[in-house]
Structures are given as structure tokens and as C-alpha cells.
Amino acid sequence: MKEKNNKIRFLENSLLVNDEILVLTDFHIGYEEYLFGKLIPIRAQLDEIMKNLEKIFSLLDKEGIKIKEIVILGDLKHEFGEITDSEWRETLLLLDYLGKNTGKIILVKGNHDNILGPIAKKREVELRDYYKLGNICFLHGDSFYDE
């Protein structure tokens, strides 16, 4: 059986596959807190992420494209060994926003996603080491896929 050719294009800082799968990566939610601790109470990271996503979804809307799946290719959050309070809040807000724009979200584990299971479970989002769809394998850059 011949595999179909996939249409893959850049859309801002994401990939759009076959006009139905949006691929995002490396949000590193919690990075500001990691850098500055609790010394600087102003958080701009999530605002910037949301502005970028709104731009992406606006472009998709103008093209009449409805996303069937969103694949996040790892490093959704930043901390390796814990889930900070801000990571909990901001990651859940992000997943809620993305959920309003698609029917399915798949989280592919990245090297910063050691403790992502509780967040994924809370929003009933699939968490995988990789995600294979036809002849495309989605995985984080620190991983290898061996069939």
C-alpha cells in the first residue's frame, strides 16, 4: 500500500500537517519562575504564548481550517522534578484554551516532561512517548523512534 504524501507547512512558529493537525512544541511553561523565582511577580510568558496562539488560530480561521488534533512535541512545562504552582495553573489554562480549538490534544513527552502525567490526567489529554500517524512519527528532539 502506498503512503500518501503529506502536506506540511510552517504557520508562524508551528507546523500544520494536512490542514488538520497543528504541531506545537517547547512552551517551557514555568521558565520565568525558574529564572526569577518569586522575586519578580509579573509573568509575561503565558501572555506571549496566548498572543501567538491567537494569531495562529486567526490565520487558520481566515483560511477556513478547523484543526482536528493538536500535537505538543514535548517540553510543555519547564521544571524536571516537580510541578510548580504556576506550572499547574498556566499549563491547565493553556490546555483549556487549546481544547476549545480542537477535538483532540496529544502530549508527546519531552526531556522536561518527567512529571506531566498528573496534568494530562486532570484534562484527560493523551500523554505518549511518541505519536505515529500514517507515515509521520511525532517525537521530541531528544528521542529516537525505532519501529
Image (cartoon, grey):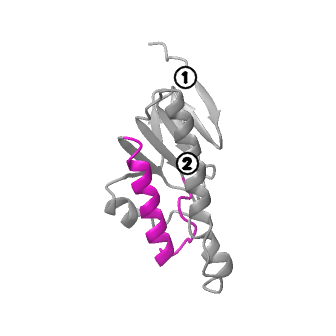
Would residue 47 be counted in the magenta stretch? no
On the image, the x and y values in percent for residue 36 come to 67, 80
The residue where tag 1 is placed is 6
85 versus 51 height, above or below: below
**Residue, x 59% and y 28% (percent of image)?**
8
Element at label 1: loop
Magenta residue span: 74-102
What is the quadrant of the N terminus in the image?
top left
- How many residues crowd around disc 1 within 10 Å: few (fewer than 14), some, or many (20 or more)? few
Q: Is residue 138 visible?
A: no
Q: Distance between the Cα atoms at labels 1 and 2? A: 23 Å
On the image, the x and y values in percent for residue 15 come to 59, 37
39 versus 84 height, above or below: below
**Residue, x 52% and y 40% (percent of image)?**
57
**For the residue marked with disc 1, what is the amino acid?**
Asn
Element at label 2: helix
**For the residue marked with disc 2, what is the amino acid?**
Leu
**Residue, x 54% and y 47% (percent of image)?**
54
The residue where tag 2 is placed is 53
Q: Earlier in the sequence, mark 1 or mark 2?
A: 1
**Left or right, 116 with reference to 8:** left
User: Which is more toward the observer, 30 or 74?
Assistant: 30
Q: Is residue 52 visible?
A: yes
**Left or right, 42 with reference to 118:** right
On the image, the x and y values in percent for residue 63 come to 53, 27
